[in-house]
Image: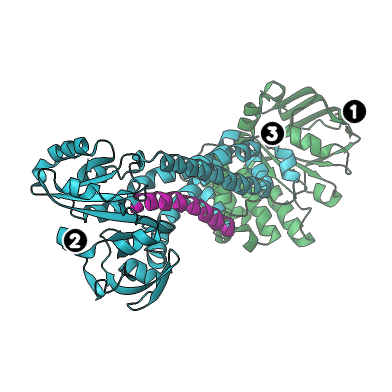
Amino acid sequence: MINKIVIENLKSRWVRTLLSALIIGVQVTSILTLLGLSRGMLQDQATRTRALGADIFLKPGSSTPLSFTSAPVSEKFLPLVAKQPHVKQAVGVLFVPAMLLTPVSGLDLAEFTRFNGGFKFIKGGPFRGPDDLIVDDYYARQNNVHVGDKLKLINHLWQVSGIVESGRLGRLVVPLRTLQRLSGNSDPPRITQIFVKLDDPAYTPQAVDQLNEAMQGNLQAVSMEAFVSQYSINNIPVLKSFIWVVNVLAIFVGFLVVFLSMYTAVIERTREIGIMKALGARPRTILNLLIRETVLLAAAGSLLGIVMSFGAQALIMTLVPASLQVVQVPDWWGYASLIAVTGALLGAIYPGLKAARQDAIEALAYE
Amino acid sequence: MNSPGTPATAEPIIRVRNLRKIYRLGEVDVQALRGVDLAVGRGEFLAMVGPSGSGKSTLFHILGGLLAPTDGEIWIDGENLRQMSDSGRTLLRQQKIGFVFQKYNLLPTLTADDNIEVARYFAGREGPRDPAFVEVLELLGIRGRLHHKPRALSGGEQQRVAIARALVNHPAILLADEPTGNLDTENSNAVLGLLRKVNQTVGQTILMITHNPEAAAFADRTVSIRDGRLQG
């Protein structure tokens, strides 16, 4: 019977029910999408890094673990790296920030092609001149870019020579020398990272040690495997804190939504609560009713939120695939729902107690 | 000779002695009941008439266990209300009291049938309804309207559902507060006739509050209340 009362209450005030569930759903979607974005961006970067085909990479000793766009170092280290035992080939890449989350990569295309087979062109082809630009298909789709188009990046006009399959290195690739000149890294020529291919990947641990010794702290060698495994939310304290903040905010939003929703519901139902009390309903029965209603609202909101997170993913992947990558995080569906239910239950406490303590006579006189 | 609140029958089901209720309004004490003595016999249909502010609603609420008195004694079906806690009075409402209100007070989201069932649920009763109550439903003539929500029922039908709800747990007393106050003459007479019939058929004790002498005429006995006191 109690469930029938709850369901009929929710059905009879369906606009309020729908809106409350929708807002709780938005809160769940925001948690899931934020996490999906964090993981998606990291996974995408890990995939693209792995696809470089390198065994080891070297970065300036002072740079942060996951930064591609750190302070460049002199190109003179490149031959020194190439001389080390088991090193088959070493290529240098310069990363320069061009726009939010999308750096421009400068490289020697011939060297890069020899290193890992190069890019797979969907349209157009390699650089024909120093001002040519290669973009990946995500970037081309998001920005409606075609071969032959002119693009202004880093205060320079580039012509798109080719569109390549996404998944290897950056989304914007230009000739190394031009990028060095434009970014003030040409005298002496500087690069941001060095990618190393070994004659046998089995020697990776030894090669890393040898390279670190040879570079004397100027560059730090890391195996690609170790580097890619660092692409996790747990290794980025700022991201972890950010996710915490969003979760706390989500609980607060859930609390406010349900508080307001239940508070108005209790006021609206003052007379009904009075009737139930006159019929012998105990305060805990009234509280029980509101808690069930809250849990049901939060559960419906969570379900809606999970469904909406697929919509958010589709929207992001359609509109801005080059800037943002989002994946589904089913392992967080339960946590996000728990966060929604917690916020909702906190919001139901005061209205619930108010209803439970309602004086029956005053409630019956309520118009 | 009997006092105004004393029934003709023996062994009262409601016994009230020197009942007082004082409301504190700001810094002023308002005496709503000033020493009421009343006895209602088992199976009696008693009407209580009085103007607004006479204290009849206060008495109704105290007898229904919705309000605690300030002083005096009240016994309902052998139980002393003065000694009852809030939860004890809740139990009393579940098991011994049936309410019928002027504004019907049905839960708007539930069907007529569920409105009746909810009273059984609060009283902790489950399973099929007993045959005696099915007879009451027949008597009230609402069996064909039970699956409608209150908004689809006329005032007279809603009040019949409210009477059915009040009787479903076979209460010791049916308390009716102006049960025909919102009804036209035809429906008023029908509802009052039904209360009379329920009283006669199943021996239901009824205490009805009204300001209408014509409604009071349906009862076995009428007592008047004015300024918080019963009058002869």
Residue sitting at x 36%, y 41%: A64
Q: CA distance from mark 3 to mark 2?
A: 107 Å
- Residue A269 rendering spot, x and y as whole percentages: 65, 48
Q: Is residue A334 above or below residue B91?
A: below
Inspect the magenta stretch and tell me whether residue A40 lies in it.
yes
Tag nearer the camera, 3 or 1? 1
Q: Secondary structure at mark 3?
A: loop
Would you name the residue on which mark 2 appears? A111
Nearer to us in this view, A140 or A175: A175
Give the amino acid at mark 2. Glu
Question: Residue A268: where, in percent of width, then height?
Answer: 67, 50
Q: Residue at x 76, y 57 (%)?
A: B189
Question: What residue is shown with label 1?
Answer: B27
Quadrant holding the N terminus of chain B: top right
Q: Is residue A109 left or right of residue A149?
A: left
Chain drawn green, letter? B
Q: Earlier in the sequence, mark 3 or mark 1?
A: 1
Q: Is residue A207 depicted above or below A170 in this figure?
A: above
How many labels, in total?
3
Q: Position of residue B60 (x, y in %)?
A: 76, 37
Q: Is residue A282 left or right of residue A172?
A: right
* Letter of the chain shown cyan in the rendering: A
Q: Which residue is mark 3?
A: B42
Q: What's under tag 1, amino acid-wise? A: Glu
Q: Which residues are magenta?
A: A14-41
- Give amino acid for label 3: Arg
The residues tagged by marks 3 and 1 sit, at their Cα atoms, a distance apart of: 41 Å
Q: Chain of mark 3?
A: B
Residue B232 % position (x, y): 91, 34
Q: Main secondary structure of the magenta part?
A: helix
Given the current orientation, which residue lies at the most extreme front position? A187
